[in-house]
Amino acid sequence: MSEFCGCPGSRMLEFQQEDTLEEGAEVRIASQLRQWPIQLHLVSPEAPYFQGADVLLAADCAAFAMGNFHNEHLKGKGLAIACPKLDGGQETYVAKIKALFEKARINTLTVLIMQVPCCHGLVALANEALRGSSRKVPVRCVVASLKGEVLQEDWL
Amino acid sequence: MERFLESPIKELIDRFPALGTVLEDYGIGCVPCSVGTCLLRDIVEIHNLSPGDEEKLMGRIAAVVAPGQSVAIPRSGRDRAAGPRKVSYSPPMKMLVEEHRRILRFVALIPALTAELDVESGEGRGRILDAVDFIRSYADRFHHAKEEDLLFACFDEGLEILKAMHEDHRRGRACVQGVLDALGRRNAGEVSRNLAEYGEILTEHIRKEDEILYPWMDRNLTTRQVGELYARFREVDEGFLEAGERYEAFIAGLEGQYLDAKVEVVR
């Protein structure tokens, strides 16, 4: 009936992967991270790397699921990460995202989430911040499958 | 029902314990979850049920949360026809599409405007000049200038599709000039013909932009460009705020005058 049984956010799954690299081949992928810290509670909207930037707000799990996270999603962007299911103090998150819109005057916000239902809470936080913001900014939502494929991209 | 779809699942199961059993029947195991902040709509959507199963599930949910009441059974909201990686209009494109809606409202009024064309009286000519003012100020200087000066500038101006759009704009402007020339000659037939041609050009032009050009542009604009375009469009909008309200009132006034009258005749 359904791909999932039980809460998709915590159900155990194991993926069978074919090794796509030849034995002995070495691939170095340069990190596209250009800042620290990255956790949403720790980042400051006043940091210079957020001013006028395109910002990626990624669910904690996304970078692990997506093989090309750095090149396809992080490159050229400021970063904040959060988990809408497990993190506390989410009202602070809303205030911080709002400050990114209003004070850092970011250019765009991309919210990258996993397909599990709990992850949509991150989009809800961004939406709440946008509704309360005096400055409107394009917000894009990218949904990744558990295997790291992009399932959907939408501008809110 | 919509209100329940937007509620966190734990809250709903606490309030309607039978809901947990219904969800479990469809392999949705939210009852043991200690967090339960997922919204019911997201939960139904993410489980990717067949349309038939989803409809049955929604019916059973409705029977639990609103027993004995007749409620509309909504879909989870997912567009099943859409393939993966479907991209919706970006915010700056949405702004242009909304402006198209207003221009099409005007175009829809052209037959009524031309049916009662009066090029002899000052009042009649004033009505035509008001229409020309809307076309030139709103459709052209405001909307088409956003496209030509800001949006099209993000692309190679030598592209055939952009040349075609420029040509449509040029033909539209020529029709407006034709309206003014004909009005000067008190030639009602020519005024009417030019307005009708303008309406045809704009209808087709807007269809091409909404269905082909803007989606293509959205696929090719970078996230950076989308943000910059949106900021520039908003600056233009802020400068046009008062005029925008005036032109909305103009269109609404014409609709009140012509469409309401049409309804009256039908009655």
Image: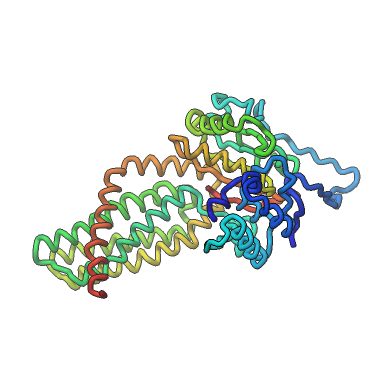
Which quadrant of the view contains residue B252? bottom left
Going 61% across and 36% down the picture, which residue do you hit? A77
Going 38% across and 58% down the picture, which residue do you hit? B101
Task: Decide if residue A119 is in sight here.
Answer: no
Going 53% across and 54% down the picture, which residue do you hit? B2
In what quadrant of the picture does the C terminus of chain B appear?
bottom left
Residue situated in front as seen by the camera: B212 or B251: B251
Which quadrant of the view contains residue A57? top right
**Residue sitting at the far left:** B121
Task: Decide if residue B216 is in sight here.
Answer: yes
Q: x%, y% of residue B197?
A: 30, 69
Q: x%, y% of residue A118?
A: 67, 44
Which quadrant of the view contains residue B184? bottom left
Going 61% across and 38% down the picture, which residue do you hit? A56
Q: x%, y% of residue B175?
A: 27, 64
Q: Is residue A139 left or right of residue B48?
A: left
**Residue sitting at the far front:** B68
Q: Answer above or below: position of A112 versus B53.
A: above
Q: Is residue B3 left or right of residue B152?
A: right
Q: Answer above or below: position of B229 versus B212.
A: above
**Residue sitting at the far bottom:** B266
Residue situated in front as seen by the camera: B232 or A110: A110
Q: Answer above or below: position of B217 versus B35.
A: below
Count the labels in the image.
Answer: 0
Residue situated in front as seen by the camera: B74 or B218: B74
**Residue sitting at the far right:** A23
Residue situated in front as seen by the camera: B67 or A133: B67
Q: x%, y% of residue B145?
A: 36, 50
Q: Is residue B30 left or right of residue B133?
A: right
In what quadrant of the picture does the N terminus of chain B appear?
bottom right
